[in-house]
Image: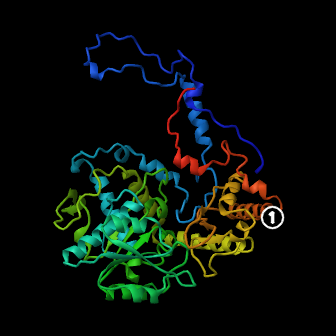
Amino acid sequence: MNPNGTKRAERLIFEYSSPGRRGVALPKLTFAIPDLPAPALRKSPPALPHVTEVDVVRHYTRLSQMNFCVDTNFYPLGSCTMKYNPRANERLAGLEGFAAAHPYQDDGDVQGLLELQWDLERYLAEIAGLDAVTLAPAAGAHGELTGMMIIAAYHRDRGEGRSVVLIPDSAHGTNPASAALCGYRAEEIASNGEGRIDINALARRIGGDTAALMITNPNTLGIFETYIRDVAEVVHSAGATLYMDGANMNAIMGIAKPGEFGVDVMHFNLHKTFSTPHGCGGPGAGPVAVTARLAPYLPVPFVEKADGRYAMSCDRPKSIGRMRSFAGNIGVLVRAYLYIRSMGPDGLRRAADMAVFHSDYLRSRLAGILPLAYPTNTRHEFVLTAQRLAKKGVRALDIAKRLLDYGIHPPTVYFPLIVREALMIEPTETENLKTLDAFVDAMREIVREAGETPEVVTSAPHTMPIGRLDEVKAVKEPRLTWQPH
């Protein structure tokens, strides 16, 4: 590992272009080209690069090797659970019966695939401690929106004019967005000195206008809400609904069931907790689990079973309707099913235990290098603060950029918002001791550099094809297409 080395930047595919080069050799046409209407004809050829097949292969292979991913580097991205995806599951999910299924196929042709979905719903319901599950949502935020739509439909069906959703100050940013999309006004509930929900502040604010409290447990600080049953009692006594963001289920699966500590509706992130591909806006999956009283509002279609046969059905009169057209992420559902079946109940619990153990190990070692944001014991993730270094000109973002030079993907920075100069770290259960120790060594060295040669840190990264970007300019003046000079 050479934190001060250099790496050649890859050129654009257009820069490999030379007039007349071809990647294919097509036979001459043996038939006449039909006349096309003038509006359908191009006035000039498309501005495509002229490259050979080998140029294309080498270009995209080099681009793929520049990418930071779980397959190539440690990826301690807090709140996102970037765990390894087992290759056995990848191979099985690629079987033709799964990968080549068409959304318009007759139910009789895909009985195995429907049975898998039926079983997966029941596995997730058992893990959640809830009564019914929908696999419809295409991602975590989509599942969150689905859950809030179900809550809105439930209160509307009861003739209740509730208008407010309460959200802790440590919540994910999508929480208030999902509430607003459903017509609710989001109001913040403060955390206490332990980093947990201030139950007294909650009790003072909740009332007949409250539709739901949205929580994450463990929360975005990695802290388990130990008073969660008391919180649920306050919510339910006001006639409101308790929603749980399931982003951090990797810490408690097989250990605690949200339905048993008072949650009414929650979403899972299959691309986090159940070790399926993750990133680039997809693929993803965000199934939603609910109590029996909310089950009539789940989206359609759903899989039903009768006389040993499976079929898609829309027979749910109170449903919120369709959340999407087709299950284009079926491969993600298959991988999650395989992960759960291969792990079993004991394996899922051991995975959660090891995720917490690894996090505890890192937290205990890193706490001597940078201060913890909260001294409270955490579970699968924790938050450090670089506020002390920021006073000397080295910020959390600089540390994140410098970690790239050590071959480590940065942790989440500046989140949650209640922590200044936050570094949110989650090692997951799939890393080994050598990797965790190398991360500690890198952090220690970077903090030393911040004190002795801060310009090395503030100008990082030094080994990437592209160095420090002007991120403000990139947002305000994006260049999304290549233009010839």
On the question of residue 311 being in view, the answer is yes
Left or right for 99, reference 48:
left
- Residue drawn at (32%, 52%), measured in percent from left and top? 327
- Residue drawn at (35%, 11%), measured in percent from left and top? 29
On the question of residue 129 being in view, the answer is no
* Residue 413 rendering spot, x and y as whole percentages: 60, 63
* Residue 54 rendering spot, x and y as whole percentages: 57, 25
Tell me: residue 182, above or below residue 29.
below
Tell me: residue 339, above or below residue 369.
above
- Quarter of the figure with residue 246: bottom left
In the foreground, 253 or 54:
54
The C terminus: image quadrant: top right
Left or right for 214, reference 158:
right
How many marks the image carries: the answer is 1
* Residue 309 rendering spot, x and y as whole percentages: 21, 58
Question: What residue is pinned by disc 1?
Answer: 451
In the foreground, 126 or 416:
416
Tell me: residue 401, above or below residue 378.
above
Left or right for 314, reference 348:
left
* Residue 351 rendering spot, x and y as whole percentages: 54, 68
- Dot 1 surroundings within 10 Å: few (below 14), some, or many (20 or more)? some
- Quarter of the figure with residue 312: bottom left
In the foreground, 405 or 380:
405
| Secondary structure type for disc 1 | helix
- Quarter of the figure with residue 398: bottom right
In the foreground, 242 or 181:
181
Q: Amino acid at mark 1?
A: Gly
The structure's colour scheme is rainbow
Q: Residue furthest right?
A: 452
Left or right for 253, reference 68:
left
